[in-house]
Amino acid sequence: MAKERHPLFELTAMRVREFLREKEAVFWVFIFPVLMTFALGIAFRNTAPDKTPVAIEATTRASETAQLLSRSPEITATVMSPNEAAQALRSGKVSIVVRPQNDSYDYRFDPTRPESRAARLMLDDVLQRGRGRTDVVKTGEEKITEPGARYVDFLVPGLIGMNLMGSGLWGLGFTVVIARSRKILKRFAATPMRRSHYLFSFMLSRLVFLVLEVAAVVVFAWLVFNFTVRGSWLTLILITVLGGFTFSGLGLLVAARPTTIEGVSGLMNFIMLPMWLLSGTFFSSERFPQVLQPFIKALPLTALNTALRSVMNEGAALSSLWIPIAILLAWCLISFVVALKIFKWQ
């Protein structure tokens, strides 16, 4: 006689089969992150910097100035009328406008644009050297490219974190709310099944796909962009599993009460949108004001992205990541416990 399998195992296997039957879910979990990695990795790949566009106002010394600037491989200069130069500056077609005078140069630029401030320094240096300035002190330079310093190295951990958040929230939330709206949850609740087993099966089913989710992005980035994981793979797996559990718990919490797809969709967007913007998926969260940093660092996606980047790009040990791990554990435990308390079965 075949041994009866544990109810939790059967429930988890059912979750896995449900997921595999949803072709759209498979696309968003496995294929979409790879496409995002490819598109953004190509768009922001490390290449030689673009030349700085400069407008020269058409004066009697415009040709001489254009000749001086042509000596720099980092500047592309165009002679324009004053009106054309002003319009080009306003529209962002040029970073700075130079007006040659008899024995001086006037610069017009927007100091709030970082590229304009950099262009001001570069332009002044080229013109001053062209007019005979020499350096008082000799300097040298050494150009290096550190592993993990490319944008794609920053991007890959963020996309993995974003994918874990999306699949944890959307994958669980929609399934639970659809079951509730169809009265399936009510039927489950009437069986001898433990309710905690039903909810926990959602979180366990995430483990089946976690390795595939992460591997799809990492292997693709390795093949196409020579991306490497500098830290321990065991540490990376532990962080990934914790992140998956955390967002599964949040997904159950969000889906604990709503009875319609529209209701749960609004709640999920309300929760995920701030983390998409603030948690450093596509750019560093340090760009936001200092007063917001405590709130940003307390977000689960920020903690997950920080831990993933520390392991992947810096080779950090698990013991050095106790702060983001503590934040993820807190979100995981609190969300799952609260979901058990307030979950609506009908």
Image (cartoon, rainbow, N blue to C red):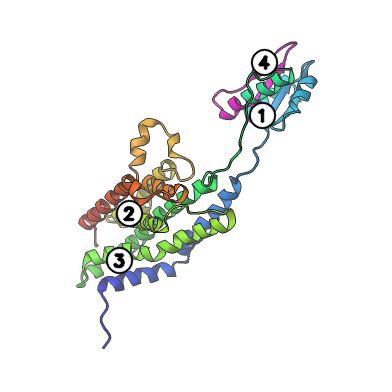
Mark 4 or mark 1: name the one nearer the start of the chain: 1
Residue on which disc 4 sits = 106
Please name the amino acid that badge 4 sits on: Asp
Mark 2 or mark 4: name the one nearer the start of the chain: 4
Of circles 3 and 4, the one toward us is 4
Mark 3 or mark 4: name the one nearer the start of the chain: 4
| Segment tinted magenta in the rendering | 92-119
What is the spatial separation of the Cα atoms under label 3 and label 2, in whole angstroms? 14 Å
In the rendered view of the protein, which quadrant contains the C terminus? bottom left
Residue on which disc 3 sits = 201
**Numbered mark located on residue 94 in the image:** 1
Mark 3 or mark 2: name the one nearer the start of the chain: 3
In contact (CB < 8 Å): disc 2 and disc 4: no
- How many C-alpha atoms fall within 10 Å of the one at disc 2: few (<14), some, or many (≥20)? many
> Where residue 82 appears, x then y in whole percent?
72, 19
Residue on which disc 2 sits = 246
Q: Residue at 44% x, 48% y: name it.
A: 309
